[in-house]
Image (cartoon, rainbow, N blue to C red):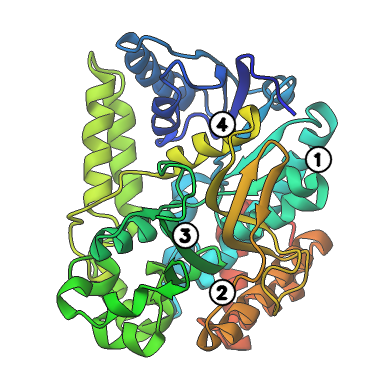
Amino acid sequence: MPTTDRLKLTILGGGGFRVPLVYSALLGEDSPIGTVVLHDVDHGRLAAIRRVLAAQAASARFAPLVEATTDLTEALTGADFVFSAIRVEGLAGRVIDERVALDEGVLGQETTGAGGVAYGLRTVPVATAIARRIALVAPSAWVINFTNPAGLVTEAMATHLGTRVIGICDSPSALARRVVRALGVPALVPDGSSPSPSADLARIEYAGLNHLGWLTGVRLGSENLLPRLLADDGRVASFEEGRLFGASRLRELSAVPNEYLHYYYDTADMVRAELKAPETRGEFLLRQQEECYRELASDDPLGAWQAALRQRDATYMALEGLGERDDAEGGGYERIALALMMAIARNEPTDLILNVRNRGTIAELDDDSVVEVLCRADATGAHPYPGAVVPAHGIELVRRIKTTERAVLTAAAEESRAVAVRAMASHPLVDSVPIARRLVDAYIARLPTLSYLR
């Protein structure tokens, strides 16, 4: 267990655009982190992000020391925590993920459908190599994974790191905050911001896989308050998922789905919207970030970064029918990461929705499956609460996606194009062997990191 002295945090993908969000969460005397080591394969991006962090630190009473390196072993050695937020082949790879899928008339999204399978196929080998390196040079480190597809990558790393790798995502906790706000009741929001559990606080019930989960309850004592919310059209319309899915559908589901379920529930509409759009989300972000990184060389790197972040947040999931977000959460994953580090480093137990090994939590999945459920985090790691329930209408979808994820892991381990095709075809948003073959061949042709598939 890490001591309460200032600790070392290594950020993989340290030249990434969202790194200043993580650093901002550490700018306080309560932070357990004394040194932040940025690792990236791109010298220029590392230098640009260091300029932003220096500007953040200039106005802070306490700021961790920042170091940077392109040497992975150097970055990892002596780390107490490792935050993994890599993007193999960068945003240019995401653009290919999206466009190749759309060319076949199937969904082009970075973690869902064909794009998510392609992203997983090229990321799993890299994440696995990183996990092996951590096991060798930093075996006592806790790994917090934000690399997408987060559940799949966490499961790949867990093969070598066991329970010392924990996946995080901001979508479930943001959903919980919005639902609790719409209900107007005091509740224990699982994002590290709520007070300690108490009998007077309602508790969130949430279960599924990463980007494939459902909030099924806001329970106060023996009463589930969620049906009260879903019966009120006005309250449902007051939060994003209510507007996205509609009150009648939520009442049919008796749950509030994670926003990513929109891709599964309204697939044809989503494909049409993406085909009509002037650019994909990846193309927008690539263009925006290229401009942003140039502006980070200006006299006001922090201001340039903040302006780009506001634009990014405001346009998040615009194609999904939300338009510009009126309550963008602004990257709440950094708060979750800090809460998790505090829980482990200082044994400050807290409830968080995390990606962890199932270990009997969801009855329909095996113990080694990484699932996204409510956990109690403390000095010994993250422990899922028993008896998490996936709604009956979601069980088959969860099983199918887990089958796809397992096929991706097998394809990467065996370097097999045939298994990669099987993974692609098994995804319900592809569901075609001929299309899967064409997709895999097109991705291999355009993404050099997939050349291992034979």
Q: Nearer the viewer, mark 4 or mark 3?
A: 4
Sequence-wise, which precedes: disc 1 or disc 2? 1
Where residue 230 appears, x then y in whole percent? Answer: 28, 79
Sequence-wise, which precedes: disc 2 or disc 3? 3
Query: Is the residue 183 above or below the residue 347 in the image?
Result: below
The residues tagged by marks 1 and 3 sit, at their Cα atoms, a distance apart of 28 Å
Sequence-wise, which precedes: disc 4 or disc 2? 4
Sequence-wise, which precedes: disc 1 or disc 3? 3
Q: Which mark is residue 96?
A: 3
- Local secondary structure at mark 3: helix
Q: Residue at x 55, y 69 (%)?
A: 207
Q: Which quarter of the figure is the N terminus placed in?
A: top right
Q: Which residue is mark 4?
A: 342
The residues tagged by marks 2 and 3 sit, at their Cα atoms, a distance apart of 11 Å
Q: Which residue is mark 2?
A: 439
Q: Residue at x 25, y 51 (%)?
A: 328
Where residue 364 appears, x then y in whole percent? Answer: 69, 80
Q: Residue at x 71, y 19 (%)?
A: 74
The answer to whether residue 48 shows anywhere in this view is yes
Crowding around mark 1 (Cα neighbors within 10 Å: few <14, some 14 to 19, many 20+) is some
Where residue 418 appears, x then y in whole percent? Answer: 75, 75
Q: Which residue is mark 1?
A: 132
Query: Is the residue 104 above or below the residue 297 in the image?
Result: below
